[in-house]
Amino acid sequence: MAARESARAISIEAEQGCLVGRFDAMASPCEILMESGDREQAAYLTRIAADEAWRIEDKFSRYIPGNVVGRINTSNGSTIEVDDETASLLDFAASLYKLSDGRFDITSGVLREVWRFDGGNRIPTQRAVSEILQRVGWSRVAWERPLLALETGMEIDLGGIGKEYAVDRVTGMLCAAAECSAVINFGGDLAVTRPPRQRESWRAGIESLSPTGGSSETVLAIRSGALATSGDSRRFLLNDGVRYSHILDPTSGWPVEGAPRSVTVAADTCTQAGMLSTLSMLQGYNAEAFLDGEGVRYWCRR
């Protein structure tokens, strides 16, 4: 805990006519772009954002022992009573499970025990995958708000919805705290508090899929709403010339066939955008058809 706390710091820099607050949270670089020339105000707003992001990380990260997710994952079949915030996230996860026909499943995180998406080439055996699948399946979970019970050996992982939830939480808090426009960007998932006044729009880049990476191939103008991106540009396996996406189908335990390399979706909230980008990835070859059916703006790279 002490090491984690000591690494938590914010910085404020002036860049391209705005002030930018930066910090790290949820394994991502985070930044707040603000139409403000007041460093004291910028530091105040960045601190609000960072404290909320760290609160959510501390509460819901599966890597932090003793938090609500840790208690659930070590419950050994016992029933756990959760608070309202956790219950709302579980309700949301349950709705995504239903919408995706079981392809979005917060119990599927245990598949990481046999899949290592580090750019290497190790492919698990079907037997190993089948054994892990015995511990996967939201349908096996007893959930009746506020009581949750997992079968022994099962776990949950809220990483698939936590970052977008944090962006929306911070967006609301900064909108209430200041009149200036701000962009909340947590590792590429972002939202705008209110339309900018000092410029026509904010600019958001969609990262290139070139081997060198790092540059933005497409630049979008955004005045309101949110963007979220799902993809496998940094997490994948290569084996005999075949690229295996880290997007796993929890019904089979194997990577989704035909999943796009990257999907970015625009929506009113980051949670909504993240939901649609993730669900589209899980559709594999049918990602574009799914998004067309939802009637949203999106950018899909294959």
Image (tube, rainbow, N blue to C red):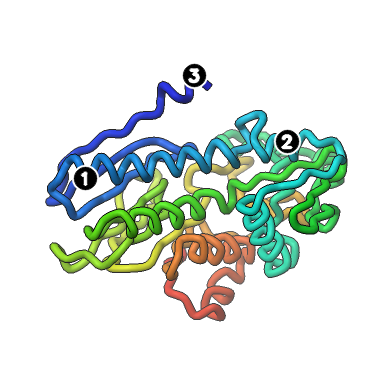
Task: Report the Cα–Cα distance between label 3 and label 1.
Answer: 28 Å
Name the residue located 36 percent from the left edge and 57 percent from the top edge: 206
Amino acid of disc 1? Gln
249 on left or right of 31:
right
| Residue receiving disc 1 | 41
Amino acid of disc 3? Ala
Question: Extreme top residue here?
Answer: 2
Task: Report the Cα–Cα distance between label 2 and label 1.
Answer: 38 Å
Q: Which numbered marker is on residue 71? A: 2
Any part of residue 128 in sight: yes
| Residue receiving disc 3 | 2
Task: Report the Cα–Cα distance between label 3 and label 2.
Answer: 21 Å
Of the numbered discs 2 and 1, the one sitting upstream in the chain is 1
Helix, strand or loop under label 1: helix
Disc 1 crowd rating (10 Å Cα; few below 14, some 14-19, many 20+) is some
Name the residue located 29 percent from the left edge and 46 percent from the top edge: 45
Amino acid of disc 2? Arg
Identify which residue, 35 or 217, lies in the foreground. 35
Residue 152 place in picture, x, y as percent: 87, 39
53 over 249 or under it: above or below: above
Within the image, what quadrant is residue 276 found in? bottom right
Helix, strand or loop under label 3: helix
Any part of residue 242 in sight: no
Name the residue located 68 percent from the left edge and 65 percent from the top edge: 95
Within the image, what quadrant is residue 203 found in? bottom left
Residue 49 place in picture, x, y as percent: 37, 45
